[in-house]
Image (spheres, rainbow, N blue to C red):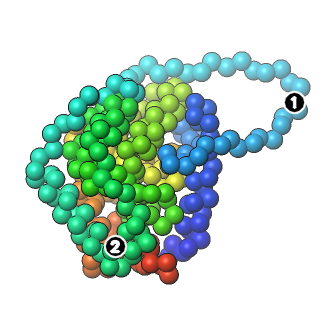
Amino acid sequence: MRKNWGRAAVIAVASIVIVLGLVFAVTVRSGKPGGAQWLSAEQPLRTTPRTPSYSTAAPTLTTRPTLTVDSGCRPGQGPAALDPVSDATTRRVGAAWDRVERWLKANAPTTAASLRPPATTARITEAQRRIGVALPAELIASLRRHDGVSGIGESFALPPFHHLASTETVAREAKVLCEVLISNGSDDSIGSWWHGRFVPIAVNGGGDGLFLDQRTGTGRLGEWDHEGSVDFDRLPTTLTELLEQTATALETGGAVLGGYRPVVTENRALDWDFPR
C-alpha cells in the first residue's frame, strides 16, 4: 500500500532542482541521460551545493558527443494555429471530465479544488509554439476543460501519481527534456529516452511523467522515466481512454492500471492505493 509517507517522498523529490542547461548526465550502464531530476514548472529553481574537490590532478579534456540523427526538437517553431478539434472528441473528453469532477466534488473536495480553470486558446497556442509540435486534439480538448492542476501535493492525479500539467508546464518540461537530450549527444537516446515530438502532459514531481507521441500524429499515450526509457505497454492507447478508465475506477472503487484503487484521505483528498 502506498502510504502517506509515499506522498511526502514525492514532494521531497520535487524540491530537488538542477540549473537549466546543466541538467544532464550519462548513466554508465545504459549510456542514456539520467541521474537528474526535474520539478514541475510551477516550482521555484534553486541549485544543490556540491562538496568541494581538492584534487591536484590535471583535468582530463573530453569531447562532448554530438547527435548525428534528428532529435525532433524544434523549440519555438510550433504551428501558429491549433488544429481543429472535432465535436466528437470534445464531447467524449468532456463526458469523462464530467464523471471525474462529479465524483471528486462528492467524495474528495480537497482534490476537486486543485483543478485549474480552462486554458484560453491563446495559452494553448503559445504552448504549442514553444514546444515546436502540433498538440493532439484530445489534449487541446482537455486543456480547454482544465489547464492542469495547482501544485503537486493533494492535487488531482491520474493513477497512480501523474498530475496533469498546465500549458506552462507542458512547454517548460518539453524544453528541459530536449535540452538534456541534445546535451547528452547520444543517438541511442532519440526515441528511447525522449524525442522532440513527444508532448509532456503530466508530471509526478520527480522527473517522470506521461506524454503523447506525435511522431506519426496519432498522440499515442506513453510514460517516460528520466533514468530509464519510455514505455507504452502499461497504459491505454489514448489520454481520453485513461480519463475514462480513471472515472470508472472512481465510480466503482475498482482497479485501474493493473491494480491501483481510489481511496480518500483524512483531508478528503484522492489517493491511489495498490493493495499488497
* Mark identifier at residue 208: none
Query: In the visual, does 175 lie left or right of 18?
Result: left
Query: In the visual, does 17 lie left or right of 109?
Result: right
Q: Who is closer to the viewer here, 184 or 87? A: 87
Q: Secondary structure at mark 2?
A: helix
Q: Position of residue 102 (x, y in %)?
A: 27, 73
Q: Which residue is rendered at x = 30% and y = 75% of the image?
A: 103
Above or below, 123 relative to 159: above
Q: Which residue is rendered at x = 51% and y = 63% of the image?
A: 153
Q: Which residue is rendered at x = 46% and y = 39% of the image?
A: 172
The kind of residue tagged 1 is Ser
Above or below, 133 relative to 140: above
Number of numbered discs overlaid on the protein picture: 2
* Mark identifier at residue 104: 2
Q: Position of residue 135 (x, y in %)?
A: 27, 39
Q: Position of residue 77 (x, y in %)?
A: 34, 24
Above or below, 129 relative to 40: above
Query: In the visual, does 28 lie left or right of 144?
Result: right
Q: CA distance from mark 2 to mark 1?
A: 57 Å
The kind of residue tagged 2 is Leu
Q: Which residue is rendered at x = 43% and y = 72% of the image?
A: 110
Residue furthest toward the left?
87
Q: Position of residue 197 (x, y in %)?
A: 33, 34
Q: Who is closer to the viewer here, 136 or 119? A: 119
Crowding near the residue tagged with mark 1, few <14, some 14–19, many ≥20 C-alpha atoms within 10 Å: few
Residue 244 location, quadrant: bottom left
Return the disc, 2 or 1, that comes first in the chain's sequence: 1
User: Is there any visible trace of residue 233 in the rendered image?
Assistant: no
* Mark identifier at residue 55: 1
